[in-house]
């Protein structure tokens, strides 16, 4: 799961959900020892419990920065939460038929990530093949999570800003400036 902090393009660490509570490829301890935000369940799906835990971690981060945020998300059944436990986060559920139109993540941010991931995966396979690996297409969970983090790091702040602008859900800068110029002090 990806989360963009704000319209400036700041990104949060990707949240990965897997099957195993401690994947065998993580030999030096849990995924958090490698710098990953990871959780698991039997289906490797987002659940209300995982969502609440994620929001509580995000809330603590926002509280430490003295910030309050508005979080846009789809209305998946797993996105139920207790607002009393996350006072620094206001969750706004996008209307079901409009999510793909007005959600900045769907406006190109995810496509940008996937493009970066495909490029990095291809490079990974070619490097493995050059190193003489028998099955260069075999990717362990640790490899996939590292590639995902690298692909997410390659999503630029300007790309994120452009996706926010593309949705049209934020006022244009010139509109804000015009409104501010009409305010009498």
Image: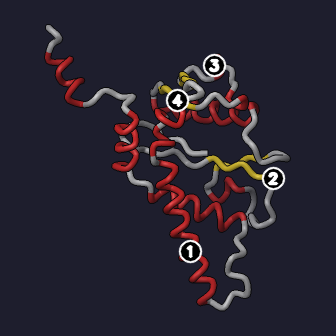
Above-or-below relation of 179 to 142: above
Residue picked out by circle 1: 122
Q: Nearer the viewer, residue 180 or 76?
A: 76
Camera-side mark, 1 or 3:
1
Q: Quadrant of residue 85?
A: top right
State the residue at coordinates (68%, 76%). 137
Q: Earlier in the sequence, mark 2 or mark 4?
A: 2
Quadrant of the image for the N terminus?
top right
Camera-side mark, 1 or 4:
4
Distance of label 2 from label 1 (alpha carbons): 25 Å
State left or right for residue 127 relative to residue 32.
left
Q: Earlier in the sequence, mark 1 or mark 3?
A: 3
Helix, strand or loop at mark 3: helix
Distance of label 1 from label 4 (alpha carbons): 34 Å
Above-or-below relation of 149 to 158: below
State the residue at coordinates (56%, 24%). 95
Q: Give percent across and percent down for residue 169.
A: 39, 28
Residue picked out by circle 4: 98
State the residue at coordinates (72%, 31%). 78
State left or right for residue 43 relative to residue 36.
right
State the residue at coordinates (81%, 52%). 19
Q: Give percent across and percent down for residue 146.
A: 60, 64
Helix, strand or loop at mark 4: loop
Q: Nearer the viewer, residue 59 or 147?
A: 147
Residue picked out by circle 3: 83
Quadrant of the image for the C terminus?
top left
Camera-side mark, 3 or 4:
4
Q: How many marks?
A: 4
Q: Earlier in the sequence, mark 2 or mark 1?
A: 2
Residue picked out by circle 2: 19
Query: Are the two marked residues, 2 and 4, in contact with CB atoms closer than 8 angstroms?
Result: no
Query: Are the two marked residues, 2 and 1, in contact with CB atoms closer than 8 angstroms?
Result: no
């Amino acid at each position: 799961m990806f989360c963009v902090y704000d319209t400036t393009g700041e990104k949060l660490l990707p949240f990965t959900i897997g099957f195993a509570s401690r994947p065998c490829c993580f030999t030096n301890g849990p995924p958090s020892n490698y710098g990953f935000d990871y959780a698991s369940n039997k289906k490797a799906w987002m659940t209300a419990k995982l969502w609440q835990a994620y929001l509580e971690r995000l809330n603590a981060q926002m509280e430490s920065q003295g910030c309050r945020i508005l979080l846009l998300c789809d209305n998946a059944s797993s996105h139920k939460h207790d607002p009393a436990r996350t006072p620094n986060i206001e969750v706004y559920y996008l209307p079901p038929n409009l999510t793909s139109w007005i959600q900045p993540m769907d406006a190109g941010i995810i496509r940008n990530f996937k493009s970066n991931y495909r490029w990095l995966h291809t490079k990974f396979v070619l490097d493995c093949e050059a190193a003489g690996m028998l099955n260069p297409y075999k990717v362990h969970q640790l490899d996939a999570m590292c590639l995902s983090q690298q692909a997410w790091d390659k999503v630029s702040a300007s790309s994120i800003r452009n996706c926010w602008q593309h949705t049209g859900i934020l006022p244009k800068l010139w509109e804000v400036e015009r409104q501010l110029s009409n305010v009498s002090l």
